[in-house]
């Protein structure tokens, strides 16, 4: 894992002796006492961090050294801040300085100070104390403290909320909610830093306040948001950005803490609500990243490049409580009495207004592409926050739905907004029933157009499948389109199987119903074909009609040919219900023969066996015998209709064999119900060579469950016809060489056929002479040496030995039936419960002896 040089350094760091370490401490203190820190200081700090982190023991530094390290946290050089914080996090704090050093010793609060404070919090009480200290800083006016400390307070609080929301008291909740209201809603609308008209006599007195602007360049007529632009911005604007970044998280936590929910409930709510927006990283410079990570505010030029926020300054005259003196908003003018609401409801109301304002701003034409991406990101967050506040206060649903519905109508025709439309779908799912809104168009888009046209978008695939997983129960109950859309949803799996297979492991059981089971079974088997078809679909749109020597040209021609168009259209269908499968599957497989080595097709084929296991495990618990019988027929049929991938075919046959055995064990009557088809399959000699795995299990099932004890409908005539079919196959494969190009039949096939014949004969004694005659001939033939149908001498000996065992059993028919077809109470004994035997008494005696009275 480490290079030889790295391992040597780590070993030296672990073996350093205490006297040498104390000398190193003293030398480092002297270096840190200087006014300037050179390379020697940096190297010494790095070495100290290696020494402290290389051992599992936590050390305590000398007081003077720790004081010097704490002073580095306020150094203008960020490298020194990083090293100081890293070293201190590897040490034990001095007594009495655990959480009381951020103001006195460490100077202004920054990211690295915050990391140290959180690492030193050893209990919930420590976190609560830290929260109180941070919130006291929020209560003071900006002019009374460091200007940039507030920008780091909210990220720290947000981190604490994530890990331990219960450490906040009701007073903390009320205070922070009031501050969030002020930062989000009430501020002046002039740009920060001032603006100059230019000229030779430009000076401080000539600078005039300039109003903030919208993304389209017009002057803003409403309150400041993250979508306002300008040349400069102030601390208040940063707090607006940070407040919006943590707003939804805070609303969820506020509800959980104030309502007394458990930590698990809080985690579940956060996962459900934060799932959509956390993956909506439209830009690496998205404004929320700064707040959630607790980073320093980026330089002004970077914000101008990415967001170009406008600004305002909060003067004493602007320190108003609610709406006094602010510009009247079209969005929020209806709530002038909101200042009379309790803090929780007031914050909810202001969050509602803020989000409606963002939705209004998102309709403006941005001049820069990065601003367009920012609009999308803010739309996602705004809709998620609206969903959150409507969950908490159902009365807001009726006020919110017209806006959300209008937003959906505006964006639904543009698939570039697909990832924005998913939170809207979440909103419809949560509140559509209450508002009595028709959601058909929403689900038609989500389950129809998204998978059909954007199956190759990895971000959308992840977000849509996550949306389905998190809302699985609601979708099954309220959205009938969900279970019918599996042909479309499986396109994500067919296109990029490794990335989404985990999602479909969770989703597949919900797609299995009595109506969809058979078609879903065929669709899973055709997934490699669908994968190849999706590749051809994309190639056909970007490749010329005629292409000389191009790979995949034949399949492309077939895809474009009207005569084969129906085959591919069936694979590309959007909904279930048009038929279980198609008649010309073999033709389709021939057309796609050149696709079997495409990497995407091979990866897709590797996931099918896993999904088939999940499918059958679900069907067994939900389906009736009629459906199971249909699936058995489908397995027999599709065993010879698979895309020509040898490994894939072998794995599918193994899955079929496993679950055929399981289905017949759970419902033995299925063997009698499907005896005609099973006998037809077992009586075909070619299946011995091409479908060894499934053929062996079909023969075993016939011999095991074709019995009166399993189904009273099993007649002597049926047993005799099955015997004759298997006898003919066994005689044929043991009396001649295998067909050209085929291997010798597997010994397991031969012994299974022999055992099945012996079992059937033990149930109809008239057949015993025929079996005995064959077994005796087999013994005689093999005495002459090697035979054409078995090339391995050890296999031949095993076959002959098994034949002699069966022949000996059949000499006494009564014993043969008891051994080959034992009654149920023998195969599944419950002696510990049977009062007619001594086992229960022995168990009770042992229990009384081993348990003290």
Image: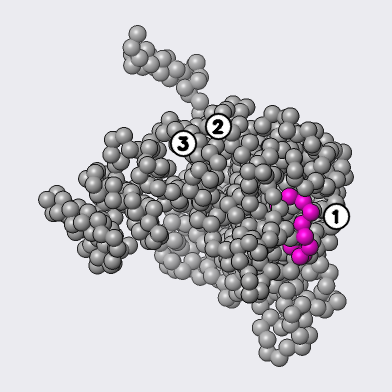
- What is the crowding at mark 3: few (fewer than 14 residues within 10 Å), some, or many (at least 20)? some
Q: Which residues are magenta?
A: 215-224
Q: To which residue does mark 2 refer?
A: 172
Mark 2 surroundings within 10 Å by alpha-carbon count, few (fewer than 14), some (14 through 19), many (20 or more)? some
Task: Give the farthest residue toward the bottom.
Answer: 548
Could you say which quadrant of the image residue 196 lies in?
Answer: bottom right
User: In which quadrant of the rendered view does residue 306 lie?
Assistant: bottom right
Do labels 3 and 1 touch, CB within 8 Å? no
Between 623 and 374, the one lying in front of the other is 374
Q: CA distance from mark 1 to mark 2?
A: 41 Å
Residue at numbered disc 3: 133
Residue 400 picture location, percent across and down? 81, 42
Tell me if I can see residue 489 in this picture: no
Magenta span includes 217: yes
- Frontmost of labels 1 and 2 is 2
Q: Which mark is residue 409?
A: 1
Quadrant of residue 127 in the image?
Answer: top left
Question: Quarter holding the N terminus?
Answer: bottom left
> Is residue 597 a member of the stretch shown in magenta?
no
């Amino acid at each position: 894992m480490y290079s030889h040089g790295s391992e040597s350094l780590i070993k030296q760091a672990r073996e350093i002796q205490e006297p040498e370490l104390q000398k190193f401490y003293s030398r480092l203190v002297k270096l840190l006492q200087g006014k300037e820190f050179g390379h020697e200081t940096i190297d010494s700090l790095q070495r100290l961090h290696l020494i402290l982190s290389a051992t599992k023991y936590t050390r305590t530094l000398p007081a003077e050294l720790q004081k010097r390290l704490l002073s580095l946290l306020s150094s203008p050089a960020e490298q020194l801040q990083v090293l100081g914080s890293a070293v201190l996090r590897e040490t034990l704090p001095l007594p009495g300085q655990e959480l009381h050093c951020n103001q006195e010793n460490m100077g202004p609060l920054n990211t690295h100070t915050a990391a140290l404070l959180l690492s030193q919090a050893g209990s919930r009480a420590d976190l609560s104390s830290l929260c109180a200290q941070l919130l006291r800083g929020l209560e003071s006016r900006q002019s009374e403290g460091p200007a940039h400390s507030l920008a780091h307070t909210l990220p720290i609080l947000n981190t604490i909320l994530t890990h331990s929301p219960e450490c906040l008291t009701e007073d903390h909740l009320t205070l922070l909610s009031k501050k969030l209201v002020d930062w989000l809603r009430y501020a002046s609308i002039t740009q920060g830093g001032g603006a100059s008209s230019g000229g030779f006599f430009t000076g401080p007195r000539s600078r005039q306040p300039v109003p903030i602007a919208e993304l389209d360049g017009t002057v803003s007529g409403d309150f400041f948001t993250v979508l306002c632009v300008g040349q400069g911005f102030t601390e208040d604007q940063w707090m607006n950005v940070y407040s919006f970044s943590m707003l939804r998280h805070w609303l969820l936590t506020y509800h959980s803490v104030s309502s007394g929910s458990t930590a698990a409930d809080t985690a579940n709510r956060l996962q459900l609500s934060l799932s959509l927006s956390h993956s909506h990283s439209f830009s690496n410079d998205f404004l929320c990243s700064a707040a959630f990570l607790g980073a320093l505010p980026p330089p002004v030029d970077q914000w101008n490049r990415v967001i170009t926020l406008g600004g305002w300054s909060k003067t004493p005259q602007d320190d108003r409580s609610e709406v006094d003196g602010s510009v009247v908003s079209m969005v929020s003018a209806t709530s002038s009495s909101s200042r009379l609401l309790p803090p929780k409801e007031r914050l909810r109301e202001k969050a509602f207004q803020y989000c409606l304002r963002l939705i209004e701003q998102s309709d403006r034409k941005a001049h820069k592409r990065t601003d367009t991406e920012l609009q999308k990101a803010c739309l996602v967050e705004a809709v998620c926050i609206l969903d959150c506040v409507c969950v908490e206060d159902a009365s807001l649903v009726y006020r919110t739905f017209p806006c959300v519905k209008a937003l959906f109508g505006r964006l639904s025709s543009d698939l570039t907004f697909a990832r924005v439309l998913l939170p809207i779908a979440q909103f419809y799912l949560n509140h559509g029933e209450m508002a009595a809104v028709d959601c058909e168009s929403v689900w038609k888009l989500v389950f129809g157009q998204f998978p059909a046209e954007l199956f190759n978008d990895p971000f959308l695939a992840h977000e849509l499948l996550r949306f389905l997983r998190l809302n699985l129960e609601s979708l099954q109950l309220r959205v009938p389109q969900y279970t019918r859309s599996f042909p479309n949803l499986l396109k994500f799996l067919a296109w990029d199987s490794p990335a989404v297979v985990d999602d479909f492991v969770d989703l597949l059981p919900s797609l299995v119903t009595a109506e969809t089971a058979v078609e879903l079974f065929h669709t899973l088997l055709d997934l490699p074909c669908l994968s190849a078809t999706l590749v051809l679909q994309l190639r056909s749109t970007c490749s010329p009609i005629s292409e000389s020597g191009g790979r995949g040209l034949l399949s492309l021609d077939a895809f474009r040919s009207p005569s084969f168009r129906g085959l591919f259209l069936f694979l590309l269908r959007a909904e279930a219900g048009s038929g279980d499968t198609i008649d010309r599957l073999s033709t389709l497989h021939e057309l796609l023969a050149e696709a079997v080595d495409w990497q995407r097709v091979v990866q897709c084929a590797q996931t099918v066996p896993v999904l088939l296991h999940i499918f059958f495990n679900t069907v067994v618990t939900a389906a009736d015998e009629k459906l199971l019988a249909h699936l058995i027929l489908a397995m027999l049929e599709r065993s010879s209709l698979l895309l020509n991938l040898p490994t894939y075919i072998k794995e599918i046959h193994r899955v079929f064999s496993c679950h055929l055995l399981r289905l017949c064990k759970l419902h033995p009557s299925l063997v009698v119900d499907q005896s005609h088809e099973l006998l037809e399959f077992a009586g075909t000699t070619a299946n011995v060579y091409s479908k060894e795995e499934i053929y062996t299990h079909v023969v075993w099932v016939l011999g095991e469950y074709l019995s009166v004890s399993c189904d009273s409908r099993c007649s002597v005539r049926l047993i005799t016809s099955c015997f004759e079919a298997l006898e003919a196959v066994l005689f044929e494969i043991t009396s001649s060489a295998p067909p050209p190009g085929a291997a010798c039949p597997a010994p397991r096939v031969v012994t299974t056929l022999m055992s099945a014949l012996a079992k059937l004969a033990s149930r109809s004694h008239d057949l015993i002479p025929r079996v005995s005659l064959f077994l005796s001939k087999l013994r005689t033939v093999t005495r002459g040496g090697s035979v054409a149908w078995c090339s391995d001498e050890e296999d031949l000996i095993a076959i002959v030995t098994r034949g002699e065992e069966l022949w000996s059993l059949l000499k006494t028919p009564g014993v043969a039936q008891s051994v080959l077809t034992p009654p149920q109470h023998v195969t599944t004994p419950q002696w510990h419960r049977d009062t007619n035997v001594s086992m229960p008494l022995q168990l009770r005696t042992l229990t009384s002896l081993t348990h003290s009275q």
